Image (tube, rainbow, N blue to C red):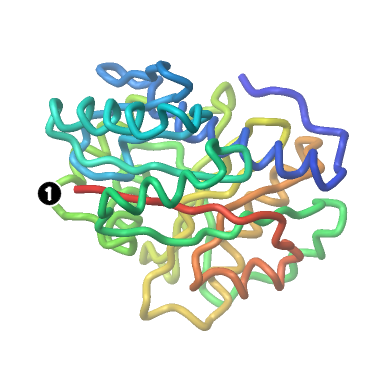
Amino acid sequence: MHDEPATDLSPPARIRALEANVSAFGRRYGRAPNAEVSHFGGMTLFITRVADPFFNGVIEAALDERNADARIEEVFTFFRNRRLPFMWGTGPSSRPADLDAHLEQRNPFLSIKLPGMVLDLSALAGGGPLPAGLRIEEVTTRRQLEQWVTLGCKVFEMPGAIVPAVIELEDQLGMGDDKPWRRYLGLLNGEPVATSMMMLGGGAAGVYWVATQPHTRGLGIGRAITAHPLFAARAMGYRLSVLQSSALGHSVYRKLGFEDCCGMRLHMWR
C-alpha cells in the first residue's frame, strides 16, 4: 500500500516530499527476498547483492561533522566486505552540509548532479495523441517485465551480465495495484523502445527508470512515457510529482511543467 497524497505544496514541503520519495524508492529494493534495509550511525542502506551500484547504496545520511569520516569508512567497509559496488545519494537534508566533499575524497568512478524537480499535477497539460505507432502498457506480465528490465539496463549502460539478476529482483518485488509502484513499457510498432516507473511515497508520485532507445529519440516518445505515469497519479488523487533529472531529460521534464527545486547528487563506486 502507499501513503496519502500530500496536501501541502509549499516550497519546503515539496523538497521534503522529493527526498522522502527518493528514500522510498531505495527502500523498495529492501523488500525483495535476500535483500535488506539497514540503519546505523545516522544512515539508511539498502542492499540487494545485484552487482551494480544502482542496486546497493546509502539513501539517507545525517552524520555528525565530528565523526563523519569514521561513519563513511564504516559504509565502505560494509560494502567492501560484501564485495558490492554501491551508490550514495545526497540532497538538501544530508549532513554534514559538506557531505559531497567528504564523498568526493573517496574517488567515486562517477559523481553526477541530478537536479531535484517538482510538478504540481493540476498544471499538467492534456495528453494529446501519442506519437504514431506508439503504445504504452503497464507492466503486468513476466514477459513485459523482462522487456522493461532489458531495455532499461541497456539504455542506462549497465553490464549485460546483471540483467537476469535484475529481472529476478524486479519479479520478486512484484506487480499489481497493491504495490506503491507501477512500471510502464512503450512499444513502437511492437518494438520495446521506452520505459518508466511511478513510485508512490512521501505523499508524492515519483518518476524513475525513464529510458528511451537512442534511435527513437526526438519523436516525442520520452515525453509520452514520462507523462503516462503523471496522468495515472493525478487520477489517483496525487497533486505532486517529483523526480531527479539527468542532463538528457531536463528539457523534456521542463516542457511537462516540472520546475527545479533543489540540488541533488549521486556518487558511485565499483
Where's residue 127, x and y in %? 74, 64
Nearer to us in this view, 250 or 139: 250
> Where in the figure is residue 101, as x and y percent of width and height?
42, 52
Quadrant for the N terminus, please. Answer: top right
Q: Where is residue 135 in the image (x, y as percent from the top left)?
A: 53, 62
Q: Residues within 10 Å of mark 1 (few under 14, many from 20)?
A: few
Nearer the observer, 96 or 249: 96
Give left or right: position of 232 versus 197: right
Please provide percent x and percent y for residue 136: 54, 57
**Which amino acid type is marked by label 1?**
Ala
- Give the residue furthest to the front: 66
Residue 226 vertical placement versus 240 (above, below): below
For residue 97, above or below residue 84: below
Q: What is the secondary structure assignment of the residue under circle 1?
A: helix
Q: Please report the residue visible at 25 percent of the width from the left and 48 percent of the height from the top.
A: 269
- Which of 126/161 is in front? 161
Residue 174 in sight: no
Residue 57 falls left or right of residue 18: left
- For the residue pair 70 and 3, the one nearer the viewer reads as 70
* Residue 167 seen: yes
Residue bearing mark 1 = 161
Is residue 49 shown above or below 253? above
Residue at 49% from the left image edge and 33% from the top image edge: 65
Q: Residue shown at 32%/48% (left/top)?
A: 149
Q: Residue at x 33, y 60 (%)?
A: 156
Q: How many marks?
A: 1
